[in-house]
Amino acid sequence: MTWLRSAFQDELDGVTATLVDLSKLVSDAISKATHALLNADIKEAEAVIAADDRVDEIQHELDSRIIDIIARQQPVASDLRALVTALRMSADLERMGDMAHHVAKISRLRHPAHAVPEELRGTVEEMGKVARLISDKVGTIINSKDIDRALEVEHDDDEMDKLHRKLFTTLLDPNWTHGIESAIDITLIGRYYERYADHAVSVSRRVYFQVTGKYNSK
């Protein structure tokens, strides 16, 4: 029985390791997508778009593996909770990859022009930094199961929300001169970063639930 438990724990550890790998991929993706967006870098935008297929593949493989573990091991209590929350975390991480993918697609769509007007570059750059900070922290939280740090992500998301509101303040200014097309681009860009952070918050909440059995909601 000890050997069986050890083998099962190895499988659980493997699931965690794959979730951490996913978090690193989507963290790199949002950084590269931000750089592509702010620098009209078509090669980097294309690389982010292509790399999203790998994120999808890993997520699908992981979900299949988790379902197989549940079917074979029939876990209960905290073990079952860990596997079910891992399924949901993988979905959130995949959606974070999608958000980075969407940012890169706007960069590609407007190339060779810059999609972000000069007066908003600083705000978008800051949104990219906050997104990277949050996703890096989430990877650490998944690995360490540190519930105190998991709670911190809620506050990190507040900063993203402030930046999101700042974008809209500029868009609604009567002095906006960049036209409707640019306004639509900025609206979508803001939404993608905001949703990226929201999914990261969801991952942190699932870690909190996995450890405590209680769901933390802001």
Image: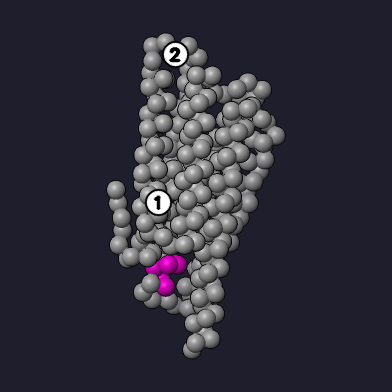
Image spot of residue 171 (x, y percent): 42, 20
Q: Which residues are magenta?
A: 79-83
Residue at x 56%, y 47% (from the top left corner): 26
Image spot of residue 111 (x, y percent): 65, 25
Task: Examine the structure image and report whether residue 82 is included in the region drawn in magenta.
Answer: yes
**Residue matched to label 1:** 202
> Contact (CB < 8 A) between labels 2 and 1?
no
Mark 2, secondary structure of its residue:
loop
Q: Which mark is residue 176?
A: 2
Q: Which kind of residue does numbered mark 1 sit on?
A: Ser
Image spot of residue 137 (x, y percent): 47, 51
Image spot of residue 132 (x, y percent): 52, 43
Q: Residue lying farthest right?
A: 43
Task: Examine the structure image and report whether residue 28 is included in the region drawn in magenta.
Answer: no
Side (left or right) of 148 relative to 97: left
Q: Which kind of residue does numbered mark 2 sit on?
A: Trp
Distance between mark 2 and mark 1 Cα atoms: 34 Å
Quick one: 61 or 27, which is closer to the camera? 27
Residue 190 visible in this rendered orientation of the protein: yes
